[in-house]
Amino acid sequence: MRQDSDDDGLDDGRELDLGTDPTRADTDGDGIADAEERRGGSDPTLADYEGPTIDVFRAEFGKDAFSGDTSYAVGYRVDDPSGVASSRLTKNGEIQTRTTWGGDRHGSQSRAFETGLPETILDGLTGTSVVVHARDTHDNRRQQVAMERANVYGATVKELTTQSDLGPERASMFAGMLSGFTVGAGSTAQTVKALTDQPLAFLGAFEQLATLVDRLGLIDKILATLPRRMVESLEAKQATNNPYDRSDPSEQAEYDAFRVGWYTGYVAFQAVQLVVGGQAQTAVKNSDRFADLVDRLDRNGRLSEAKRYYDVAKGRTTGRAKQVTFELGGRAAKGSWHLSKKSGRRVVAGVKTAAGKYDARQRLSNAEASTHSQIDALSPGDQRVVGRVLARTDDPEIIADGGDNFVAIMRQADDIDPDVAKRLAKLERDDELTVAERKRLLQAYENGRVDNEDLRRVSKLLDESNDEYLYDDAVSVEELVEIESEGGDISKTGLVVKDETSDVMWLESGNDEESWIHITARHIIGTDLDDEGGTSFWPLGQKVKGRPLPDTLDQYEVRELIYQAVKNGERTPQGEKWKYYFKPTEQGYPDSGISGMRVYVFPSGKIETSYPMSGSAHTKWANGEWVE
């Protein structure tokens, strides 16, 4: 006969209408009475699924004139009918304060924290956001942005708009590229300052790079290789750095332009770093050096290598990424060695970017026990270096395989390609490269004089066990590096030699007009013939113009003859060039069938061409016919 059987404030007839249980004050068992849930606007038949409400009533920051520290103060109120369990303040994702509420339904407080000088500088350059997070007793969560500090990119857009003929959208897109590239590079204050002090100096190079990235479709390819939560993290960083209000219709076009530019810049850094490693960060500190780097990427087509890499990587990462199951301090997946928790944390802490941390952690979990053992024995500093290695290689065993000096090399140039570092470490152990030479070589890499592809070829040239390239031991490492300053491209060089005057000469792959491609086309396979003038052929058993030629040499032996001609031949001037004359059959190659040959070299030292002049295996095409 009672109107409200369960005394919850709702009469039984109303509860039947609502679908609640008239005999239970809390139908869904979530700790909140049915009537209270109705007053709060939630459904009393569903267990509590909403986090606490958050009301920020104070948010401010300040810095004393003579202090490098920045003080932040945030006041907020939290409410939840099931009780508030905890709350915290984060700045750019890092926890600053924590509070335990113990199930109180309401609470308010003001919390303060400080940042030191390095973080203060970086916050001013890249912007920052402070967020309040709250959790109720049912583990439902909610967050509210307390403040967002403007960043330097807003000022950059204004500068680009007022000091150039760039329109607002193009200026916004370019500022976005600078911002995205900076985040990819680790958001160091030095990098941000370099890009934003004189942004117009970088404009041409960045737009050229953006064109390359777009042409190769790298934006979609690279983002497809990242776990979904990494992409979400990137979007949050983009939104923090974007100086425009997305909810303001008058700023929508600029917001979207900045966002497109931001992702282009971020992806551009990932692609460039894959190709040139540490140069992606060192070159950007100087506009001329950065422009030269981008020009070389464009001219040499090296970003195509990045495209091929991400084509493969996309196939490996299609679908939702699996959660990393390795726990620091746990057992390795493939061995019995227990990596200490401190070691694991140092390894992951050494990585600059969130995506890199994810990769390093996953690869650490898949490493062999021997690798874990070696990592555990390293110094804390070297363990952080290992983290950067693991973020950039699919082969964690390279740390153990590289030998004791591998980590030392990675420490000096931590963005070097790990495979290149492994080969340099082997050369050092085999006494083919001294420690001093290695340090000078990596210094050239750090200074931007050579890049990863150059180092890859240098390591192969120095390796006496290679059967592909020819290298003169009389050429020092410093002289090898100098090839780049003479306009050469070490990454495409397969022969380096000193002549009798100690000048360094080299043979590149070249093109139709010079070097090995020209030699092959004109003097071996005969695809570059004309009806006037004469062309002689190296005897490799090929068929040219329907005629089978003698078979006394192979391609490696032709390059070896070019090497010997420069090193031991007779040198005479030919205008601004040098020409070398050599007699193979008399000087060590009696079965070559070539008694005389020429090599022409540009003033820089780059070999232009080479061809046979006489001998039993010598053949010549002139004026549209064979010369008998």
Image: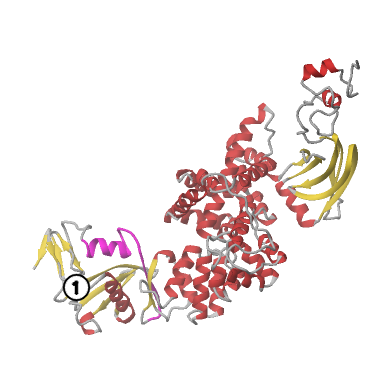
Question: Label 1, on which residue?
Answer: 613
Kindly identify the amino acid type of the residue bearing the numbered disc 1.
Met
The residue segment tinted magenta is 501-525
- Say which quadrant the C terminus sits in: bottom left
Front residue of 266 and 425: 425
- Say which quadrant the N terminus sits in: top right
Q: Quarter of the image holding residue 87? A: top right
Q: Quarter of the image holding residue 407? A: bottom right
Let me know if residue 562 is in the magenta part.
Answer: no
Q: In this view, does 66 lie above or below 548?
A: above
Label 1's element? strand
Front residue of 43 and 64: 43
Q: Is residue 62 above or below residue 396?
A: above
Report the number of discs.
1
Farthest-out residue, left: 628
Let me know if residue 504 is in the magenta part.
Answer: yes
Query: How many residues crowd mark 1 within 10 Å: few (<14), some (14–19), many (20+)?
Result: many
Q: Residue at x 46, y 71 (%)?
A: 459
Tell me if 370 is positioned left or right of 574 in this view. Answer: right
Front residue of 359 and 499: 359
Residue 261's x, y, as percent?
58, 41
Q: Residue at x 31, y 65 (%)?
A: 516
Q: Which residue is drawn at 55% across and 70% down?
A: 442
Q: In this view, does 537 lie above or below 238?
A: below
Residue 156's x, y, as percent?
66, 43
Tell me if 608 is positioned left or right of 462 in this view. Answer: left
